Amino acid sequence: MTTLRLNPALAKACHVPDAPRTGTAPPAPPCGNALGDWALALVHTRPQKLVIAVSSLTHWAFCLPYAPMPTLQSRFGPALLQALLSLGVPPDRARAEIDHSEPWILGRGIDRSTVGHLTQYRHSVTWAAGEGLSLGAINARLADHLVLRPREGYPAEEVLRLLGGNPALVAQRQNDKSDQWRKAYDHAQAQIGREEVHIPVALALPDQPRLEAAHQASILLMRLPHDDGVSGPPSRTGNPRGRWIPRTLVIDFADVDSASPTFARALLDEVATLGVHSLHLANAEPGVLEAFERVSRDTSR
């Protein structure tokens, strides 16, 4: 048996009675349960409300849909299983963690050491959902979350260590991101002064086959060449960020399956603000082109 400890707003929505004021400590996790009890909070996001769940023992977190609220207990196990598998936990160990945790019961009384982490995660989820990220993308971001207290580290590493995965994968992901950033930067800097600049999405935003958020457009355009001594081409003045603004920008969408109108609108708006004369979409799949065409149709109305 494992307790899902709800914050006041979620406990009220789920009609969970107030915890008795006995001063007794919460029960210890059952034998075989590596992640302990869970702290849950409601996050008011759009288009759907989400529930953020934080492990009391590792402070690792994942999200699941709030609705339908009456089925929260029955949906929690399958959602946790999927999150563990996505993290890299071996299937047999992930399944065993669920089996040793069930049944799930609802309660109150979130441990004070977990409250701060729960608040941080809620802010992160609110921002990510507001940017248009899907549930899967939000959980991928949570998997890379770094905590500083009570000790610095990645909660995902501890989960993998406890459940038979490879904790080194978390640090390796961070190193790979740093290497990709350097490659993207070098590729951009080699194009300083050119009237036509190419940005490969696969280099600027690796391993992201779907572009769905506004901030992804901003990250993509950060891959324009940087030179503090350059304000832009002769026809463009006043570029305080030191970005080389070409006349023509070619964005290569190879390895990208689809894009959302949110991403397309943000990219077009920022390209226009920067003063780029011509934007070309290279190797764009139908799922990418449709997003830009939809924005164009909406704009022309």
Image (cartoon, rainbow, N blue to C red):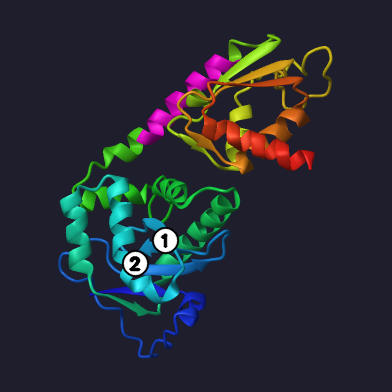
Q: Is residue 276 left or right of residue 32?
A: right
Give the percent coordinates (x, y) of residue 103.
24, 74
Please state if 235 lies on the left or on the right of 243 as rendered: right
Q: Secondary structure at mark 1?
A: strand
The percent position of residue 194, horizontal first and vertical second, equals: 68, 9
Q: CA distance from mark 1 to mark 2?
A: 9 Å
Q: How many marks?
A: 2
Q: Where does the image place residue 7, in percent across and percent down from the top left? A: 46, 74
Q: Which mark is residue 75?
A: 2
- Near mark 2 (Cα within 10 A), the count class, few <14, some 14-19 or many ≥20, is some
Q: Quadrant of residue 291?
A: top right
User: What residue lies at 72% left-to-right and 27% top-to-bottom?
Assistant: 241
Q: Is residue 269 left or right of residue 54?
A: right
Residue kind at label 2, given as amino acid type: Arg
* Up-down relation of residue 237 to residue 193 (above or below): below
In the displayed structure, would residue 79 be above or below residue 88? below
Does label 1 or label 2 sit earlier along the sequence? 1
The answer to whether residue 33 is seen in the rendering is: no
* Contact, mark 1 vs mark 2 (Cβ under 8 Å): yes
Crowding at dot 1, Cα within 10 Å, few <14 / some 14-19 / many 20+, comes out as many
Examine the rendering and report whether any part of residue 159 can be seen. Answer: yes
Quadrant location, the N terminus: bottom left
Instruction: Return the mark for residue 64.
Output: 1
Q: Any magenta on residue 14?
A: no
The foreground one among 260 and 157 is 260
Q: Quick check: 250 above or below 16?
A: above
- Classified by dominant secondary structure, the portion drawn in magenta counts as helix
Q: Amino acid at mark 1?
A: Leu
Q: Which residues are magenta?
A: 173-188
Find numbered disc 2 in the image and state the secondary structure of the residue it sits on: helix
| Residue 187 counted in the magenta span | yes
